Image (cartoon, rainbow, N blue to C red):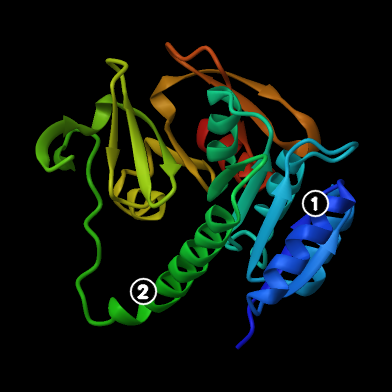
Amino acid sequence: MTKSILVIEDDLNIIANIKALLEEEGYFVLTASNGEEGIKSAKNNLPDLIICDILMPRCSGYDVLNELSLLPSTRSIPFIFLTAMADKDDIRKGMQLGVDDYLPKPFKTDDLLKSIETRLRRKEVFKSEPEKNIGQPEVKEFNIDDKIFMNVNGIPLLLNIKEIVFISAENQYSSVSTESGKNYLVRKSVSLWEEQLPQRNFLRIHRAVIVNMNYIERIEKWYNSSLLIYLRNFEKPFTVSKRYSAKLRKNIS
C-alpha cells in the first residue's frame, strides 16, 4: 500500500522540491503551507509520516507536534523536523515533545529518504509488537526501593529506582537522568518504562517524558491548559501536555 506523507513548510519552493522527490519514490504527498493547515490536514487525513518545519509564523513546528500528540489518532504518527537551527536546547525541546528525527537545512536527499524509510519501518515493527507479546508474562512493576540492572553500551549498571529523576525518549532509545547529574542512554522505550516504574512515584507528562514526582519543586500554568514543572537541580522546565496535566493534578492533590 502506498504510504502517505504530510509536508508542512511555509517555503513553497521547499514544499515543491520535497513533493517532487517523494512522489518519484512512490509516496503519496500531502502539503500544508503553515502549521494550522498542517494540523487540520493531519487530523483529517492521518498520514503515515509528517515532515514539518520548525520556524513558521503564528503556529510553529513545536505547536504542531504538541497539538497532534494530544490526540490518540495522531500521536503515534512519526514526526520529522526540518530546521535551520542546530542548538542543543532546540533539539532537546523537540525530543521532549516526542519528535522522531531532525534534519538540518539544507539537507541531503539521501538523508531525508533514509530518515523516512527508518521511521516508517519502525512504525510497522511497533504495530506488530502486541501480536508478538501474546502469551508472554506481564511486565513486572518495580518498587521505589528496588535496584535495577541496565545495559549501558554493553556494560551492566546497577541503579537505584529512587535516584532516577526523569526519562526522555531519544529516538529508539531512552535517556535516563539521575540525581547525581549523570545520563545513561539505554535501548528501552518510554512506554516500557511507564509500565515498569512505580505509578505512585513516576508519571508520564508527555508521550516522550516520564518524571519522578518526588523531584518536583514547583508547577506553573502554561497555555492551552498545559503546565510547566520544575525539577530539583534542573534549571529548565518540562512541559506537561494537556492530556497529562489532569493526571498530574490528581497525583499531587
Nearer the observer, 13 or 115: 13
Image location (x, y in percent) of residue 36: 88, 51
Nearer the observer, 90 or 231: 90
Residue 60, compared with residue 171, is above or below; it is above
Report the amino acid beneath label 1: Ile
Q: Where, quadrant-wise, is the C terminus in this rendering?
A: top right
Which of the labelled discs sits on residue 34, or is there none?
none
Image location (x, y in percent) of residue 6: 74, 64
Image location (x, y in percent) of residue 247: 57, 43
Q: Is residue 42 left or right of residue 10?
A: left
Query: Marks 2/1: CA distance?
Result: 36 Å
Nearer the observer, 214 or 191: 191
Nearer the observer, 227 or 32: 32
Which of the labelled discs sits on residue 14, or is there none?
1
Q: Where, quadrant-wise, is the N terminus in this rendering?
A: bottom right
Could one spot residue 172 in this view of the protein?
Answer: yes
Which residue is denoted by mark 2 in the rendering? Answer: 129
Residue 38, compared with residue 94, is above or below; it is below
Which residue is rendered at x = 73% and y = 39% of the image? 54
Report the amino acid beneath label 2: Glu
Question: What secondary structure is marked by label 2?
Answer: helix
